[in-house]
């Protein structure tokens, strides 16, 4: 297949390599300038492809410092031109921070064509923005997690730390699930799933994004560790997974936030899968293992950091994830004390108003819908309803 990867960061670079390695014709599109990964992008342009250190070839959870052999995959096109990258593609995979979805949708959705599969990873219901600016009829999909965990380690080179065994997708509208799954199953083995493993709709996928839970709580618990190291051990940095998510405080917060998330999912008619069980499904072929033990083993491969509280684990996953969760809870009449407390604390630490910045039913243009109308919109109406919504 012809696949366009949008986003030249960690996830986009790794998926571009994986898709090329699997025999697909891959185009890589970078949409930002002078923000991040510019040297990496220019090096790939020069090399006409990407190098990868795929540590999964040495084991499922491998120490991130124990590197496999570096290999190379050429890419068909590496560009900053959206039209050139998107036209003629079978699949478009969008790996950008979800805060930029509205802006990017205005730039690129006009190039989408009928029956292209457009996957946003993560989505946080961002498909709605792309639909607003699209005149044709592509199949929109959203992933709750990337197919891999990866880091750009030097310009032109990405390191893959692990690959998911399974990745569930949601489709917008959900009535196009069968069409979308048939295409997605040809991308990577992680997408080759029974249709029963697809998420019910894009809000189902958004709330099962593990980053809502693990990034936000992990960073909040890590904040005093970062402050302490900065003052007393400036040459050291804590690890979010190894250190912050090893504390009883973190797991008490996870339990409470997870319960609120599952209450919202149940009210939306979705299966309320606990955080750890959803992680086990994504990460492991053997589903008979203990989910907490699998999570603990992942720490071996997790890199240090993040080095600052002011990073996308907070500035993306709080306003795009937690605020969306809070907004849905409010619409459904569900109390969200843990979710709202975490939003308020993170807002206070960074002196920002994440409620005002965040993704809500109002910012999606859906505030006036009843619960029944909201479900009809994501499950069956999709773009048809957008024709009557203000842009």
Image (cartoon, rainbow, N blue to C red):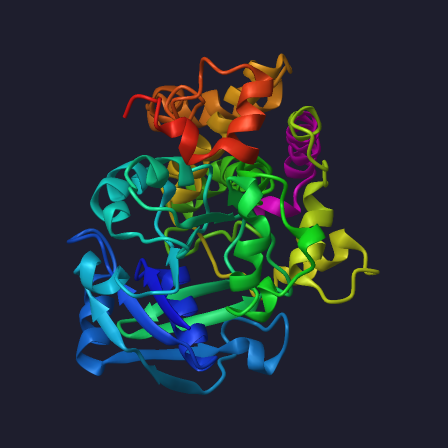
Which quadrant of the figure has residue 325? top right
Q: Is residue 269 left or right of residue 39?
A: right
Q: Residue at x 67, y 54 (%)?
A: 195
Q: Position of residue 367 (x, y in %)?
A: 44, 16
Q: Is residue 41 above or below residue 354?
A: below
**Where is the C terminus found, in terms of image quarters?**
top left
* Front-most of residues 84 and 59: 84
Segment tinted magenta in the rendering: 243-263
Q: Residue at x 49, y 16 (%)?
A: 369
Q: Is residue 258 magenta?
A: yes
Q: Is residue 276 left or right of residue 224?
A: right
Q: Residue at x 49, y 47 (%)?
A: 142
Q: Residue furthest right?
A: 288
Q: Is residue 333 magenta?
A: no
Q: Is residue 56 above or below residue 333?
A: below
Specify whether residue 283 is in view: yes
Q: Position of residue 64 (x, y in %)?
A: 51, 70
Q: Position of residue 38 (x, y in %)?
A: 20, 62
Q: Is residue 264 left or right of residue 318?
A: right
Q: Is residue 45 above or below residue 378?
A: below
* Front-most of residues 310 and 175: 175
Dominant SS type (magenta): helix
């Amino acid at each position: 297949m012809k696949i366009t990867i949008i986003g030249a960061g960690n996830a986009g670079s790794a998926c571009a390599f994986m898709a090329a390695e699997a025999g697909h014709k891959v185009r890589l599109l970078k949409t930002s300038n002078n923000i991040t990964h510019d040297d990496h992008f220019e090096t790939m342009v020069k090399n006409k492809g990407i190098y990868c250190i795929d540590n999964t070839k040495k084991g499922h959870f491998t120490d991130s410092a124990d590197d496999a052999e570096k290999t190379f995959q050429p890419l068909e096109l590496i560009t900053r031109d959206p039209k050139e990258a998107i036209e003629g593609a079978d699949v478009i995979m969008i790996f950008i921070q979800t805060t930029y979805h509205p802006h990017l949708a205005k730039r690129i959705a006009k190039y989408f064509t009928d029956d292209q599969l457009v996957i946003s990873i993560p989505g946080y219901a961002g498909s709605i923005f792309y639909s607003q600016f699209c005149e044709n009829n592509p199949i929109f999909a959203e992933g709750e997690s990337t197919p891999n965990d990866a880091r750009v380690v030097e310009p032109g080179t990405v390191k893959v730390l692990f690959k998911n065994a399974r990745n569930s997708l949601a489709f917008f509208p959900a009535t196009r699930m069968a069409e979308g799954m048939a295409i997605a199953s040809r991308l990577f083995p992680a997408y080759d799933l029974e249709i029963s493993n697809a998420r019910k709709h894009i809000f189902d996928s958004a709330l099962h994004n593990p980053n809502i839970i693990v990034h936000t709580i992990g960073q909040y618990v890590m904040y005093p560790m970062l402050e302490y190291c900065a003052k007393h051990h400036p040459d050291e940095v804590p690890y979010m997974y190894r250190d912050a998510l090893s504390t009883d405080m973190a797991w008490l917060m996870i339990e409470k936030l997870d319960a609120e998330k599952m209450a919202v999912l149940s009210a939306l008619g979705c299966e309320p899968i606990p955080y750890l069980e959803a992680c086990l499904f994504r990460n492991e072929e053997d589903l008979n293992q203990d989910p907490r033990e699998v999570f603990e083993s992942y720490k071996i491969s997790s890199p240090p950091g993040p080095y600052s509280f002011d990073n996308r684990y907070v500035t993306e996953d709080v306003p795009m994830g937690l605020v969306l969760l809070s907004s849905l809870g409010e619409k459904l009449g569900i109390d969200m004390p843990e979710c709202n407390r975490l939003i308020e604390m993170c807002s206070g630490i960074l002196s920002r108003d994440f409620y005002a910045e965040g993704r809500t039913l109002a910012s999606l243009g859906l505030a006036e819908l009843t619960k029944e109308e909201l479900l009809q919109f994501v499950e069956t109406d999709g773009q048809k309803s957008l024709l009557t919504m203000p842009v």
